[in-house]
Amino acid sequence: MDISVVVPLYNEAESLPELAAWIERVMTEHGYSYEVLFVNDGSTDGSWKVIEQLHAANACMKGVNFRRNYGKSPALNTGFARAQGDVVITMDADLQDSPDEIPELYRMIKEEGYDLVSGWKKKRYDPLSKTLPTKLFNATARCVSGIKNLHDFNCGLKAYRSEVVKHIEVYGDMHRYVPYLAKVAGFTRIGEKVVQHQARKYGSSKFGLDRFVNGYLDLLTLWFQAKFGVKPMHFFGLLGSLMFLIGFIAVIVVGALKLYNMYHNHPYTLVTNSPYFYLALTAMILGTQLFLTGFLGELITRHAPDRNHYEISSELM
Ligand code: UDP
Ligand code: MG
């Protein structure tokens, strides 16, 4: 099969028939063999009924029905696991992404050798309250992930070589960082294509401004996992040692200063009267705790089932 289109959706019943017809038109025009995987993320508006009708009319329209709402990432992950096409394309269900982009995305993966091509909604039809924070979000993501050439991490329209989606796990709210996940898994040929974007026609956006707070926290998590996932002591040990050392030196200085003053009969007070004494004490306690956290982290990763999981692309034995 040439193409699998994975469509995560939550309460998008009005958009679905239009989207399905549009995808079908593009696919038949270009003669692709294809499937469309609608992953219904616990919709309450009869979206599943619509998907059943679409499936009855055209067997290429397939569906997975979640019993409750889990989120976009779990929906994508489920679609990825089931996708059979050589190229997997993800697309939002709200008609904001245009199926007309499919042929070019497919070509870029097949002919230009990209592992992943991400859409870039260069001209957006979203409220300013969303586009402005998005700019900041993308700049941060570029910087942390080291994928310098992407302008729009969170674009719903993306194309993947089949291998890529079979080797990454999208969970929680990590759909914002699939290119980063792919990079961590060793797929580094990541490209970008400017795509058309439309204003939402039916229904409403499912994400509020909290996406930027959560997105930022998720980015930190990914960064930490990619860098220190199996060696947490390298992170906590260094921080803890530094902290402890600063505290220790400060305590020595505070103590030595008092001894010096005593010895030379200068006026002196209790060391506990000095604010530096308390700062030093706190630094030493924090340092010890960070260090212990490192040890605990090491014990935990020692038992992680995938601590010795490596992405191997080929072998000669
Ligand atoms: N979506 C989903 N589960 C959720 C929230 C959203 O599957 O819990 C789907 C939604 O139906 C849409 C896509 O994810 O197909 C993107 O959502 P939305 O259009 O609301 O996001 P925005 O365009 O505002 O970024
Ligand atoms: Mg949308």
Image (cartoon, grey):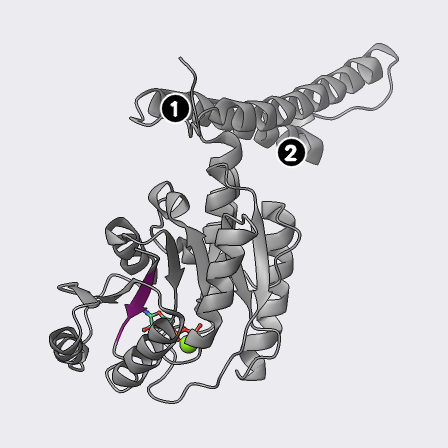
Q: Are marks 2 and 1 in contact (CB under 8 Å)?
A: no
* Label whose residue precedes the other's in the sequence (2 or 1): 2
Placement of the C terminus among the 4 image quadrants: top left
Q: Residue 168: which quarter of the image?
A: top left
Q: Which residue is found at the position 39% from the left and 81% from the top?
A: 95
> Could you give the CA–CA distance between mark 2 and mark 1, rounded to whole angstroms?
26 Å
Instruction: Name the side, left or right, on which 254 lies relative to 261.
Output: left
Q: Let me know if residue 307 appears in the view.
A: yes
Q: Is residue 311 positioned above or below 157 on the image?
A: above
Residue 124 pos. (x, y %): 57, 80
Does the segment drawn in magenta span residue 6? yes
Q: Which residue is mark 1?
A: 296
Label 1 CA crowd tier, 10 Å (few <14, some 14–19, many 20+): some
Going 25% across and 78% down the picture, which residue do you hit?
A: 11
The span picked out in magenta is 4-10
The quadrant the N terminus occupies is bottom left
- Image x and y of residue 245, in percent: 66, 21
Tell me which residue sits at (28%, 60%) in the image.
Answer: 75
The three-letter code of the residue at mark 1 reads Leu
Is label 1 in a helix, a strand or a loop? helix
Disc 1 C-beta below 8 A from ligand 1: no
Dividing the image into four quarters, tell me where ligand 2 lies: bottom left
Question: In which quarter of the view is residue 273 placed?
Answer: top right
Q: Main secondary structure of the magenta part?
A: strand
Residue tagged by mark 2? 279
Q: Look at the image and say whether residue 192 sits in the magenta stretch.
A: no
Tag shown at residue 56: none
